């Protein structure tokens, strides 16, 4: 028996020594296009991120031993495909900053550095001071939105509707029905200067209002519709050029390989399928990985439901004033804007069956302008979402061809006497052009 054990130990030792010879390379060397950031920010990145996300080869002695080396190499090469500080310097500054915004979000959510990596490499822990250094550099709200010389009326008027036949590069067809979906959330993105309306189909809206979001039911569909921001002459920030639409489809069996969600994206007014090939989905799943415990969903849907133990619903934004003759969130959103001076965000919704067509410019049905204060998005650094309701303003035509205007205050206040300003406010709401859509 002793000889058998001795033989097994010898075989095991020989095998261990042999596998040390199998050592595929981890590419390293001078950085060809290193990220361009101030010295204090670069020091943080070098300390906390470069070991995996750059060509700097920094392995501890125990990382060099097989089979640990294979695992470390796999993680490093994968990390570089997501973010490579040695090469991102060739991209424009906004692109470099966008990557840092996402990196800060990943750190805040505990997704990066990888928990298993930190267990063996505690020196890579990102301290609160490190994080503040990077945040101060990014400063998402420190500079104004760049002016865009675009006529808003022209932006909103789409003379012809393109024939959309493209599937996304992973085979998901374009779903034009998103135009009739309801509002789940709105995001004012300071990191990339975009507005995003998050819309949901009937299944998604019902699930959100009932708090049935962990997990979301099969059949749920989200549309994240994005526009580039621009200023108006009176200092508001409004949707400018249409940027993209992203679709998420919940089907636990069909999309088992991607956490039960199907992902698709089309960019530009001509809705060009995003990516080079079907592997674009890895970008989606990688970004949403920190939200796996929240069924991969970043959005806090506007809902009055109660879900214990986690912040996954935007309850404050759902507290509409008393006495409303309808729920404006049952209507269709057509545009949005933020007021940087008042720190508010507003969405215009219309009670119309014609939303999403070129006749939208001439809408004449009832409108509701809902205004909220803004708060920082707890899930994404550099974004703000709706918080407490400030007001709900309703404008509708009457039988006498006069415009009826009513205003309701937030926090359950109810109707407000707005006779002194109703003419001006009604005219302002009527002047808001719909956001550009394909």
Image: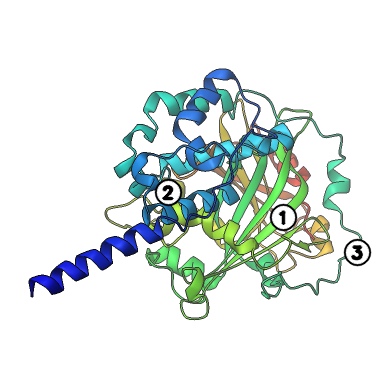
Upstream in sequence: badge 3 or badge 2: 3
Q: Position of residue 21 (x, y in %)?
A: 44, 56
The residue pinned by badge 3 equals: 160
The relative height of residue 170 versus residue 270 in the rendered view (above or below) is below
Q: Position of residue 413 (x, y in %)?
A: 43, 41
Within 10 angstroms of label 1, few (less than 14), some, or many (20 or more) residues? many
- In the image, 391 versus 401, the foreground residue is 391
Q: Quadrant of the C terminus?
A: bottom right
The residue pinned by badge 1 equals: 244
Numbered circle sitting on residue 25: none
Within 10 angstroms of label 3, few (less than 14), some, or many (20 or more) residues? few
Q: Quadrant of residue 128?
A: top left
Point out the residue furthest to the top here.
Answer: 39
Upstream in sequence: badge 2 or badge 1: 1
The residue pinned by badge 2 equals: 319
Q: Is residue 306 left or right of 46 when viewed as pictured?
A: left
- In the image, 19 versus 380, the foreground residue is 19
Q: Cα distance, mark 1 to mark 3?
A: 18 Å
Point out the residue furthest to the bottom here.
Answer: 253
Q: Is residue 175 left or right of 325 when viewed as pictured?
A: right
Q: Quadrant of the N terminus?
A: bottom left
Point out the residue furthest to the front here.
Answer: 3
Residue 379 appearing in the image: yes
Q: Position of residue 370 (x, y in %)?
A: 58, 46
Point out the residue furthest to the right here.
Answer: 159
Q: Quadrant of residue 85?
A: top right
Q: Cα distance, mark 2 to mark 1?
A: 30 Å
Asked which secondary structure carries label 2, the reply is loop
- In the image, 364 versus 307, the foreground residue is 307
Identity of the residue drawn at 56% across and 37% down: 101
Upstream in sequence: badge 1 or badge 3: 3
């Amino acid at each position: 028996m002793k000889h058998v054990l001795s033989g097994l130990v010898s075989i095991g030792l020989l095998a261990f020594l042999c596998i040390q010879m199998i050592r595929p390379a981890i590419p390293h060397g001078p950085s060809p296009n290193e990220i361009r950031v101030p010295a204090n920010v670069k020091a943080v990145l070098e300390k906390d991120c470069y070991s995996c996300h750059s060509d700097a080869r920094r392995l501890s002695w125990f990382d060099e031993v097989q089979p640990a080396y294979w695992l470390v190499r796999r993680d490093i090469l994968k990390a570089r495909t997501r973010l490579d500080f040695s090469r991102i310097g060739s991209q424009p500054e906004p692109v470099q900053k966008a990557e840092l915004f996402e990196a800060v979000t990943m750190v805040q959510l505990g997704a990066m550095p990888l928990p298993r990596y930190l267990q063996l490499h505690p020196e890579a822990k990102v301290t609160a001071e490190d994080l503040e250094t990077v945040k101060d550099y990014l400063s998402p709200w420190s500079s104004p939105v760049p002016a865009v010389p675009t006529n808003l009326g022209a932006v909103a008027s789409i003379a012809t509707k393109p024939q959309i036949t493209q599937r996304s590069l992973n085979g998901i067809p374009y779903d034009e029905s998103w135009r009739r979906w309801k509002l789940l959330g709105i995001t004012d993105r300071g990191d990339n200067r975009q507005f995003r309306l998050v819309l949901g189909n009937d299944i998604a809206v019902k699930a959100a209002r009932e708090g049935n979001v962990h997990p979301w039911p099969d059949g749920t569909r989200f549309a994240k519709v994005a526009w580039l921001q621009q200023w108006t002459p009176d200092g508001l920030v409004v949707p400018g050029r249409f940027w993209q639409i992203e679709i998420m489809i919940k089907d636990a069996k069909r999309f088992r390989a991607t956490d039960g969600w199907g992902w698709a994206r089309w960019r530009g007014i001509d809705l060009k399928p995003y990516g080079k090939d079907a592997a674009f989905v890895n970008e989606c799943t990688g970004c949403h990985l920190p939200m796996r415990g929240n069924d991969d969903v970043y959005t806090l849907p506007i809902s009055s439901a109660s879900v214990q133990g986690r912040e996954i619903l935007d309850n404050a934004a759902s507290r509409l004033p008393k006495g409303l003759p309808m729920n404006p969130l049952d209507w269709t959103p057509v545009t949005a804007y933020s007021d940087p001076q008042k720190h508010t965000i507003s969405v215009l919704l219309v009670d119309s069956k014609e939303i999403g067509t070129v006749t939208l410019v001439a809408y004449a049905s009832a409108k509701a302008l809902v205004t909220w204060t803004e708060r920082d998005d707890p899930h994404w650094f550099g974004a703000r979402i709706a918080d407490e309701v400030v007001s709900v303003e309703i404008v509708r035509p009457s039988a006498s061809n006069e415009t009826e205007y009513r205003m309701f205050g937030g926090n359950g206040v109810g109707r407000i006497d707005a006779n002194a300003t109703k003419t001006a406010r009604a005219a302002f709401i009527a002047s808001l052009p719909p956001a550009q859509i394909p």
